């Protein structure tokens, strides 16, 4: 039972990982999060099936 709790991340490990992520991706983090949000939104729209043709948005932008 002790080995199961040994590998669970604590608050200090989470803070260290957060600091490393900020150091590596600090300047690009807003654009990465924006892209992630757009991807989640598109995924939710696709799951609902509100758009019959997935390429219609791309075609509308090119015109």
Image: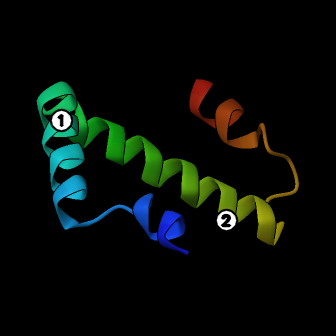
Label 1: state its secondary structure.
Answer: helix
* Residue 50 visible in rendering: no
Disc number lying in front (1 or 2) = 1
- Tag 1 residue: 20
The mark that comes first in sequence, 1 or 2, is: 1
Decide: marks 1, 2 in contact (CB < 8 A)?
A: no
Q: Where does the C terminus fall, quadrant-wise?
A: top right
12 w.r.t. 50: above or below: above
Q: CA distance from mark 1 to mark 2?
A: 30 Å
Q: Looking at the image, what colour scheme do you see?
A: rainbow
Measuring from the top left, give residue 9's x and y in whole percent: 35, 61
- The answer to which of 47 and 57 lies nearer the viewer is 47
- Residue at (23% x, 54% y) in the render: 13
Give the residue displayed 88% in from the left and 56% down from the top.
52
Tell me the tag on residue 49: none
Which picture quadrant has residue 15? bottom left
Name the spot of residue 11 as percent of width and height, x first.
Answer: 20, 66
In the picture, which quadrant includes the N terminus? bottom right
Identify residue for label 2. Answer: 44
Q: Position of residue 48 (x, y in %)?
A: 79, 71
Q: Residue furthest front?
A: 2
Position of residue 38 measured from the top left corner of the image (x, y, whole percent): 49, 50
């Amino acid at each position: 039972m002790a080995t199961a709790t040994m590998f669970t991340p604590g608050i200090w490990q989470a803070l260290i990982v957060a600091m490393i992520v900020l150091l590596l991706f600090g300047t690009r983090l807003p654009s990465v999060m924006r892209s992630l949000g757009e991807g989640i939104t598109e995924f939710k729209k696709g799951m609902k099936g509100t758009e019959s043709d997935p390429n219609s948005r791309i075609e509308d932008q090119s015109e």
